[in-house]
Amino acid sequence: MRRFFTALVVVFALASSALADVKPNALFSDGAVFQRGMPVPVWGTAAPDEKVTVEFSNQKKTATADAQGRWKVTLDPMTASAEHKILTISGSIDNRKSEIKNVLVGEVWVCSGQSNMAMGGKADPNTDGVKVRMFKVEKRESLKPLAEVSGKWVECSGGVSSAVGYYFGRDIAKATGVPVGMIHSSVGGTPAQSWTSLSGLEKEPKLSVYAEPTRKALENYDEAKYAQAQSDYQVKLKEWEEKVGKDYLEAVKVWNDKSKKSKGKDQSAGPMPQPSMPKPVAPQSPIRGASCILFNGMIAPLMPYAIKGTVWYQGESNNGKPLEYRTLFPRMIADWREKWGIGDFPFFFVQIAPHNAMTPELREAQFLTSKNTPNTAMAVITDVGDATNIHPAKKEPVGARLALAARALVYGGKIEYSGPEYDSFKIDKNRVVLSFKHIGSGLVAKDGPLKGFTIADASRKFVPAKAEIDGNTVVVTSDQVTAPVAVRYGWANVPDVNLWNKDGLPASPFRTDPESIASDTPVVKNQAPANKPVSKHK
C-alpha cells in the first residue's frame, strides 16, 4: 500500500510538472517600464483553458488561456510612477504564481535600426536621479512571426547597449520627469526590408522583388526537414573530422612548413594537399535570400507592448538603391503602425551621416520621407559624421536631436526641433531665392560665409555658388550662371556645409531639381483604427 501511494505521488508530481508554466512574455520581467496614459496589454502562456489573474497597481484583471495556452489581459491607463511596484501573475491550477519586481510606469520607446543604433556606450553619471532602463532584444531571425522574445531590462547606470537610444531616453526623462524605458532591437548591416513584414511588403507592388522570394521561401519551409538536415550534417561533419580532417590538417601543416623553407630556393613543396574525401557541406538555411526575418524575430514579438513611439537609425545598407528607399522606408513605417494597432505613433529617425560611401540621394530619400509621412521627424547630423568611418563616434548629439523632436511634437515643448528645412524656391533673374521651414530664431551661417551651395542653368552643369542669407531666405548666385534653373546644397557623399538656424540645428542637404521631387513617392498613411490617437503628455 505504501508503494502504491508513493507511486501516486510521483504520478501527480510528473503531471503537475508537465503543465505549461504560467509566465508572461519576457518583456514583463524584473525592472520593466510600463507606458503611462494608455491601455497596457500584458500577455503570456499557461496551460490550455487555465484562468490567469494579473494584479498591478490596485488593478486586477483575469483571462482564460486559449487552446494553445495563450492569454492576454489589458491594464487600464496609469499615471507615471517611479515607485517600485510588483506585477503578480497567478494561475488557477495548483495556485501557481509569479512576481515581477521593480516595475515602473513612465514613457516607453523602441529604438531600432542597424549598427549605428546598435553601438553601445556609457551612461551619463550626472543625471540627478533620472531613471532610464533598457531592454536589449537578442538577435533572432525567422521566416514566421514569433511570439516570444529574449532579453532583460537593465538600469542604464554603466554600459548601455545603444548609445543613441540611451541619450534619447535620458533627455526625455529629464524633460518629462518620469521614468523612461527603451526597448532596443537592432542588428548591424541590415536593410529596411528585413525589418518589414511580408504582408507589409506585399501592399506595395514596387517591393515585390522582396516579397516574392520571401513568400516562396515560406511556402517551401519545412522546419522538421531542415532540423533533420542540420542534425545529419553534424553527424557527417564529426565523422569527416575524425576520419579525414585530422590527417588532412596535419598534411597541410607539413606542406606549409616545407613551403616556407623552400621559398627562394630551387626545390618545391609540391601541390597543396587535398582531403581524401570532400568536407560535408552545411544545408542551406531556408531564410537565405528572404526579407522580413528581423521583423518576424525581433519586432513582431514586441507587439502589442504599449509604447509611445520609435526612434530609428538605419539606411546605410540600402544606400545602393536610394530611389527604392523612397518607397520602402515609408512602407516599413506604415507596416509597424498598422500591426501595432495604436495609430500613427511617433516615428523619429536619423539622416545618414557624411561618409565617403554614403550618397546624397539616400539622404534625400530620408528627407522626403520626413516630409511625406505623417508624425515623423528627422535628425540631421551633417556636423558629426566621419568621412572614413561609417560609425561616427559622436552619439550624444544624435540622441539629443531625436529627443528634441519628441519633446516638441509629443510632449508639448515650445522648442525648435529641426534645422532649416528646404521648402520652395523662386527664380529672380540671375538669382535663386530659397525659402525654408523651421527657421526658428533665424537663419545663420555657422563659422564663416555660407558654403556648400551649387547652381546650374538648363545645361544641368552645377558650379560652386555664392549664397547669402536675406532675412528668412537664402539667395544663391554665380557669375557663371545667368539663367539659373536649379540649386543644390550639400549634394555630396561628404557635404561641407554650414547653414544652421540660431537654435543650434543644421539644415538637411537638398536639391531643387524637379526630378528630385518624388511624384511617385506614396504618402503612406496608417491603416490602423483612426480612433486610437497618440496621447500627449506635457
Image (tube, rainbow, N blue to C red):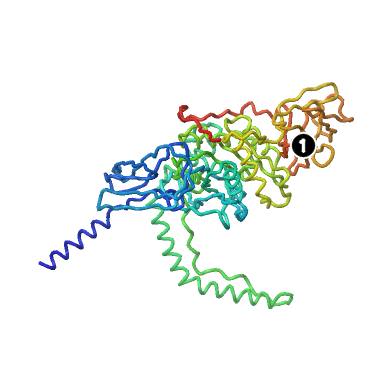
Q: Quadrant of the N terminus?
A: bottom left
Mark 1 secondary-structure assignment: strand
Question: x, y percentage for residue 117?
Answer: 60, 48
Question: x, y percentage for residue 393?
Answer: 68, 52
Residue at the far left: name it.
1
Q: Quadrant of the C terminus?
A: top right
Q: Identify the residue at horizontal 68%, vertical 28% (top origin).
A: 517
- In the picture provided, is 348 more to the left or to the right than 70? right
Residue at the far right: name it.
479
Number of marks in picture: 1
Q: Which residue is mark 1?
A: 499
Question: x, y percentage for residue 90?
Answer: 31, 49
Residue 481 higher or lower than 448, as above or below: above
Q: Identify the residue at horizontal 41%, vertical 64% (top origin).
A: 235
Residue 260 higher or lower than 189, as above or below: below
- Residue 497 placement: quadrant: top right
Please state which amino acid type lies under the numbered disc 1.
Answer: Leu
* Residue closer to the observer: 460 or 155: 155
Residue 329 higher or lower than 10, as above or below: above
* Residue closer to the observer: 302 or 250: 302
* Residue closer to the observer: 480 or 112: 112
